[in-house]
Image: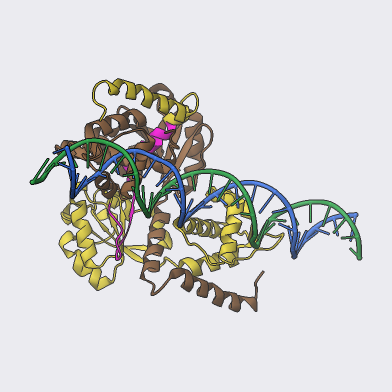
Chain colours: A yellow, B brown, C green, D blue
DNA sequence: CATTTGTTGTGCTACTTTTCACAAAAACTA
DNA sequence: TAGTTTTTGTGAAAAGTAGCACAACAAATG
């Protein structure tokens, strides 16, 4: 009854909401826990538990009413519409995100982009671009709370400070520098390089003959023997 | 001693390795668990436990030898260098990723990009672009195992099938459609829209006066009362 | 109305991952 | 050498998370 509202749960709820919106637009009226589970890749029992936790009831046979569910999820999650964000660093990734279709489907709006060299940014990105020096005034004037950080690695922490000082409350950080959440500013780090390396690792691991743990253990053991004789600390 | 090698652990190891590389290039020789913990945003005890799990020893006072650590991590994680990937869907995000700096720092190489309309892709992306129809032959000829999927939502599942048939073993999926890992093909989904929505939610939650769970509960309760009289299932 | 079918709701269990807390050891200090 | 400091290494406790299994119930069927 009193929900945990843990991070993964919130992400699941957001995904449910997206699916429900799609189903609704397809004319569906009801949905079962296993449909939703399939769609977002979790067990049906978890879907039911999520809803039960939030006191969202279904019908013992007819599943869940889509209208009701999505309405309730909107209440819980808040409508993200009308939310406005800025993008700091209009390089490749920043520009790509600025034009990300999802944003133009009404989810939220990119109010402006910022860059050290606004004149180099192609006008095709379709949002106003200002020099980095104007972040603070813009954020204050327009009451912006959330920013996307997509600057080069070496100015990451500097821009982080600027954003915090400007009063930004949340940053989606595409920089490979891991920024830390503080009381006033929540950070979500997305490290594309690490994601790919991770995928590579999983693939290799998956391709290995038997259990990885075993083979890893053996690698480590070999190494320990090698190293023992020269420089084990 | 026999490590779990769970997903989060692998990500931490990848991050350690990145940090260690940087520290090494700065001329450092030793590092403490709290340095690494700070750098990747976890508790020092967890860093030590990670290393202890992998039988990577430190010095009771002098911390860990960077050389040794990064060498061992390379053994465990495998060198990602010389790995080659393809990008399917050379729209904004695909092109951005193709030019992502991290990839040119020697992590891995983008072998080619694919698109339905290769002629529309700017040659500035710096990799060869082929029509989607050539994916299968290219993957087989060049022994590609990992792909990035950044096509529009509506062709996501179609391209997923093409990649699986071509023998791709891992996909980093930037499409908002949640793809599912199978025996032969590991999927990592990155849903930028959900990430931003999530950030918004966390920010709002963080901004709320008291405990969210309480306020959420009250929202839900109100709603239940409202709804009770009309259409609670 | 009785029976069957299919789906929810959830207590309990099992598991995974993180943190705590402190002994052990190495390195300094004098 | 004795004492002090600093940091590792780790068993045990805690926190969090997901899955199972089945009772409860609504709808459909005959």
Q: Residue at x 45, y 67 (%)?
A: A79
Q: What percent of the width, then of the height, locates residue B135?
A: 43, 30
Q: Is residue B230 highlighted in magenta?
A: no
Residue nearer the viewer, B18 or C6: B18
Corner quadrant of residue D24: bottom right
Corner quadrant of residue C28: top left
User: Which segment is the magenta one?
Assistant: A179-203
Residue nearer the viewer, A232 or A105: A232
Query: Where is C19 relative to A183, above or below?
Result: above
Query: Where is A73 relative to B42, above or below?
Result: below
Query: Where is A174 relative to A230, above or below?
Result: below
- The answer to whether residue A196 shows anywhere in this view is no
Q: What percent of the width, then of the height, locates residue B189?
A: 44, 45
Q: Is residue A196 highlighted in magenta?
A: yes
Corner quadrant of residue A183: bottom left
- The answer to whether residue A80 shows anywhere in this view is yes
Query: Where is A227 relative to A73, above or below?
Result: above
Q: Residue at x 18, y 55 (%)?
A: A158
Q: Residue at x 40, y 37 (%)?
A: A199
């Amino acid at each position: 009854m009193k929900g945990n509202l843990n991070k993964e749960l919130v992400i699941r709820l957001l995904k449910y909401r997206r699916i429900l919106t799609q189903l609704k637009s397809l004319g569906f009226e009801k949905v079962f826990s296993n449909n939703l589970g399939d769609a977002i890749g979790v067990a049906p029992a978890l879907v039911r538990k999520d809803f039960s936790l939030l006191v969202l009831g279904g019908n013992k046979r007819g599943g869940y009413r889509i209208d009701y569910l999505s309405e309730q999820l909107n209440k819980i999650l808040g409508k993200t519409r009308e939310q406005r964000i800025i993008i700091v660093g209009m390089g490749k990734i920043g520009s790509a995100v600025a034009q990300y279709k999802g944003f133009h489907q009404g989810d939220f709006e990119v109010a402006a982009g910022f860059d050290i060299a606004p004149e180099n940014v192609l006008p095709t990105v379709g949002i106003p671009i200002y020099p980095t020096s104007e972040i603070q005034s813009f954020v204050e004037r327009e009451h912006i709370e959330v920013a996307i950080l997509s600057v080069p690695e070496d100015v990451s922490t500097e821009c982080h400070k600027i954003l915090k000082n400007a009063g930004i409350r949340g940053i989606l950080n595409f920089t490979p520098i891991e920024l830390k959440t503080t009381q006033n500013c929540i950070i979500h780090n997305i490290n594309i390089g690490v994601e790919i390396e991770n995928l590579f690792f999983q693939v290799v691991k998956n391709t290995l003959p038997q259990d990885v743990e075993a083979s890893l253990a053996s690698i480590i053991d070999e190494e320990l023997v090698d190293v023992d004789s020269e420089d084990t600390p």
